[in-house]
Image (cartoon, rainbow, N blue to C red):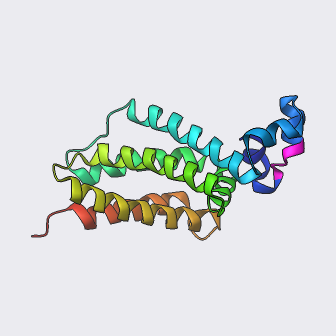
Amino acid sequence: MALAAEGGYDAVVMRDLADQANVAVGTLYNYFTSKDHLLTAAYLEWTTELEERIMSRPPRGEAPADRVTDVLGRVCEALGRQPRLVSAILTAANAKAPEVAELDREAGVTMTAMIESALALSEPQLSAQVTAVIEHVMHSALLSWINGRMQMPEVIAVIETTAHLLLDERR
């Protein structure tokens, strides 16, 4: 994660990582089939730690949209501090390898749990549908941020708008 945070995806070289960890390159490949697999495993660990930090402070807000915006705003602030790492993780997580897809799915389960916990909706099907839409919007906005087309405050604003459009009652 340190290599990716400093130099992005291309800075993560298995040989360099093995040297830093003081292990043989073959040892790394015994556990991780590729750089993408290794980065996605790090992403899963990071997501789990992030969930613990975020959920240690209850979501603020009376309305579901406010609570989701609070939680995902904090997630985005954490991501915003490490743009190269986020870029590397998003690149790795999009690899087609089944072992990468499985770890990415597990990290997604963690993100889904954070969103659904903040929503606290009584209808499970509605909660799942709203969460899926918010996750897709967030992913798209983060890609725009990584590619320099949005600033992090814009990403947070898009998530907030989406949450309110989906959840606020129409009068």
The answer to whether any part of residue 157 appears in the image is no
Magenta run includes residue 14 = yes
The front one of 34 and 76 is 34
The quadrant in which residue 162 appears is bottom left
What residue is rendered at 89% in x and 43% in y?
A: 15
Name, please, the residue furthest toward the left.
Answer: 171
In the picture, measured across the screen, residue 98 lies left or right of residue 163, that is right
24 versus 145 height, above or below: above
Q: Point out the image quarter for the C terminus.
A: bottom left
The image shows residue 80 at horizontal and vertical percentages of 58, 50
**Chain part drawn in magenta:** 11-15
The answer to whether any part of residue 124 appears in the image is yes
What residue is rendered at 53% in x and 58% in y?
A: 152
Magenta run includes residue 137 = no
The front one of 14 and 97 is 97
The image shows residue 21 at horizontal and vertical percentages of 83, 30
The front one of 49 and 30 is 30
In the picture, measured across the screen, residue 86 lies left or right of residue 61, that is right
